[in-house]
Each structure stands twice: as structure tokens, then as C-alpha cells.
Image: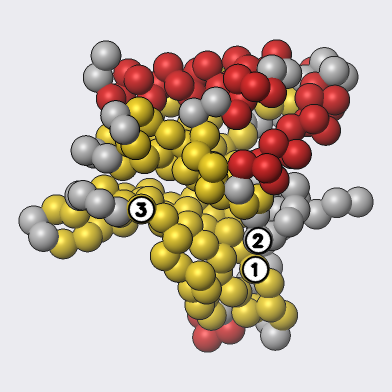
Amino acid sequence: MTDEEQITALIKNWAAAVHSGDLTAVLADHSPDIVMFDVPPPERGVRGIDEYRETWPPFFQWQTSGAVFEVVSIEVTAGTDVAFAVVLLRCGTADEFERDPEARLRLTVGLRKIDDRWQVTHEHHSFTDKSAVPETSEAEIRSLHQGWFDGTAPGDLAVAWGLDRIVADGKESLSRGTRIFQKRDGKWFMIHQHVSFPLEED
């Protein structure tokens, strides 16, 4: 199989394992130092395989309400040792899809090839924020990258993730950002960006 085919199969197997609640299979092919920016808090993300493991039992419990977790589309870009995938999934209950049939979970996956095997080093999950966006002048918005660049860039493809400090209307908050860069003719270009805030809990 090509690298793209291997990664597509890896993600489909992972999604099937999530849907069936198979924790061992969910953790397979994940790096010990994985960083996940998830829909729920914390803002800083989940760091390391132990924290990643702890996020899944509550999600599996929620799935018993009849929720689905299934892949809609996967787009993979693979370099020599680094790859990323952009994935859309149906993730929700029947009631939620009745209210919004087109709702999709957006997922960006960063991978690194280690010992000729692809491993997931980063996941970024988010839903579209459908709340009203406040009007903010350009002068009021400051985005300062903190902790950049976590990630990996051994060849002509780079996956970077970190926290952005946002100041708007005098209020400060953190957003999580995943950005993909590709080197073309000796210059780096950003080819994908995934930014989100954690879902506020009631």
C-alpha cells in the first residue's frame, strides 16, 4: 500500500475502534507523546498517551445513548516522514442529527513515520462554532503564538501545534491551533489551518 493508503486505513480502523468502544485499538498507532486538542476542555490540550487514554471511557459511555462516530471523508497528504490528514466525521445522536443533519466533527491528524511505521502524534477535534461572532476591530485582535513550534518537520512537510493568545475587546483567551506547512522551491507555505476553542461546559 502507498503511505496515503496506509494512513487512510489507520484512521478508518481508529474510527471503527472508537465507535465500538475498543480502547486498546483506539490507542494503537499513537505516539507516547501525543498531543490532542479535543472538543471538551482543557484549553492546553491532552498531552501524552496516559492523558489521551483517560479521555475515552466517558466518550464511550456517551455513545451508549445511541451516538454514532463514523468517517465521512479523509484527505491524506504524506511526505517522507511526516503526514497529515483532514477528516470529517458524523459524531452525534439521532436527535442531534435531526436538528442539524449536516453537522460534522472536523479532525486534523498529524503523523510521523518511526521505524517504517506511521504513528499519530497529534489530533485536533472541533465542531463548527455556530454562535454569533462579535464584531472586533483589527486593532483589538492580537494573536501571539505561545509554545510554537511543537510538532515535527524533518523534510518538506511540517505539522505544528500550539496555543494562541487572543486579545479582543479587552478580553484575553486561548485558542488551540494546528497548522500544516509545505516547502515549495525552498520556501515554507501554510497549506492547512485548524483553530478551535474548547466547548464550554454548562
Q: Are marks 2 and 1 in contact (CB under 8 Å)?
A: yes
Q: Along the polypeptide, which appears first: circle 3 or circle 1?
A: 3
Whether residue 102 is situated above or below residue 171 in the rendered picture: above
- Find residue 113 and report its horizontal and vertical position in percent: 33, 36
Q: CA distance from mark 2 to mark 3?
A: 19 Å
Coloration mode: secondary structure
Q: Position of residue 122 (x, y in %)?
A: 50, 45
Q: Nearer the viewer, residue 50 or 172?
A: 50
Q: Residue at x 52, y 73 (%)?
A: 146
Do labels 2 and 3 touch, CB within 8 Å?
no
Circle 3 sits in a helix, a strand or a loop, which is it? strand
Q: Residue at x 73, y 56 (%)?
A: 42
Residue at the spot of label 3: 152
Dot 1 lies on which element?
A: strand
Relative depth, front residue between 200 and 9 = 9
Q: Residue furthest front?
A: 115
- Number of marks in picture: 3
Question: Which of pointers 2 and 3 indicates the residue nearer the eye?
Answer: 3
- Which residue type does callout 2 highlight? Arg
Is residue 148 toward the left or the right of residue 57 in the image?
A: left
Amino acid identity at mark 3? Thr
Residue at x 29%, y 29% (from the top left corner): 116
> Which labelled disc corresponds to residue 44?
2
Residues at discs 3 and 1 in contact (Cβ within 8 Å): no
Q: Residue 174 got which mark?
A: 1
Amino acid under label 1?
Leu
Camera-near label (3 vs 1) is 3
Q: Which dot marks residue 97?
A: none
Vertical arrangement, residue 150 with respect to residue 104, above or below: below
Q: Classify mark 2: helix, strand or loop.
A: loop
Q: Residue at x 52, y 58 (%)?
A: 177
| First along the sequence among labels 2 and 1 | 2
